[in-house]
């Protein structure tokens, strides 16, 4: 056999082994995520709150309790997370939010939210339904719209 075919076979075997390893790691991660979702659902509470402010902040700058920073892996401490400052009863609290729900949260309005610890998992409007924000159009969609308007 030529050296080229030997090199290609070795690369192919390494890629197959890498795919198998990633498959099993993915399965394990799915199981962990399912367990965590069950734990979040078990301790969830529905609370009405007034949203004061929201933003994407680093964990250090968010004003979360120190135990949250200690339990966060070091490689994730510098990442930005969606943070909501809300008044729950007489207390003003800083809460983390699910990334899917973050755009739905209105500022300076009262909402009914499902929270689990310091994590907001669901939001509903208290007096009226929440407004869903418009999705941003992609570059090609904007160009297509401009071309259609120019053709008219």
Image: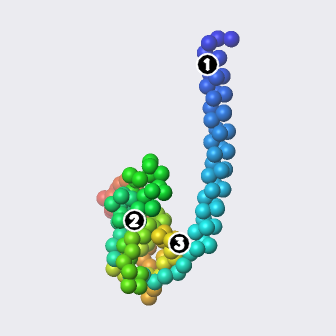
Which residue is pictured at 66% across the width and 28% down the height?
A: 13
The reply to whether callout 1 and callout 3 are in contact (CB within 8 Å) is no
* Dot placed on the residue nearer the N-terminal end, 1 or 3: 1
Q: Which residue is mark 3?
A: 116
Residue 35 visible in the displayed image: yes
What number of labels is visible? 3
When the figure is inspected, residue 3 is found, relative to residue 101, above or below; the finding is above
- Indicate left or right for 106 with 32 as reference: left
Q: What residue does disc 2 label?
A: 64
From the viewer's perspective, is residue 53 above or below residue 16? below
Label 1 to label 2: alpha-carbon separation? 52 Å
Outermost residue to the bottom: 127
Residue visible at 47% across and 70% down? 118
> Could you tell me residue 110's position as x and y percent?
40, 83
* Residue 97 located left or right of residue 149: right
Q: Residues within 10 Å of mark 1 (few under 14, many from 20)?
A: few
Q: Secondary structure at mark 3?
A: strand
Q: Residue at x 44, y 49 (%)?
A: 74
- The residue carrying pointer 3 sits among few (fewer than 14), some (14 to 19) or many (20 or more) residues within 10 Å by Cα, namely some
């Amino acid at each position: 056999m030529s050296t080229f075919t030997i090199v290609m076979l070795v690369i192919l075997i390494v890629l197959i082994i890498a795919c198998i390893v990633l498959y099993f790691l993915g399965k394990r991660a799915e199981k962990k995520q399912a367990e965590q979702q069950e734990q979040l659902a078990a301790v969830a509470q529905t609370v009405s709150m007034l949203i004061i402010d929201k933003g994407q902040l680093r964990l250090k700058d968010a004003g979360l309790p120190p135990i949250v920073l200690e339990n966060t892996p070091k490689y994730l401490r510098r990442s930005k997370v969606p943070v909501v400052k809300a008044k729950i009863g007489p207390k003003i609290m800083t809460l983390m939010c699910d990334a899917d729900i973050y755009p739905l949260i209105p500022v300076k309005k009262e909402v009914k939210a499902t929270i689990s610890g310091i994590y907001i998992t669901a939001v509903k409007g208290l007096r009226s339904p929440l407004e869903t924000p418009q999705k941003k159009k992609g570059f090609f969609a904007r160009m297509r719209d401009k071309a259609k308007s120019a053709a008219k």
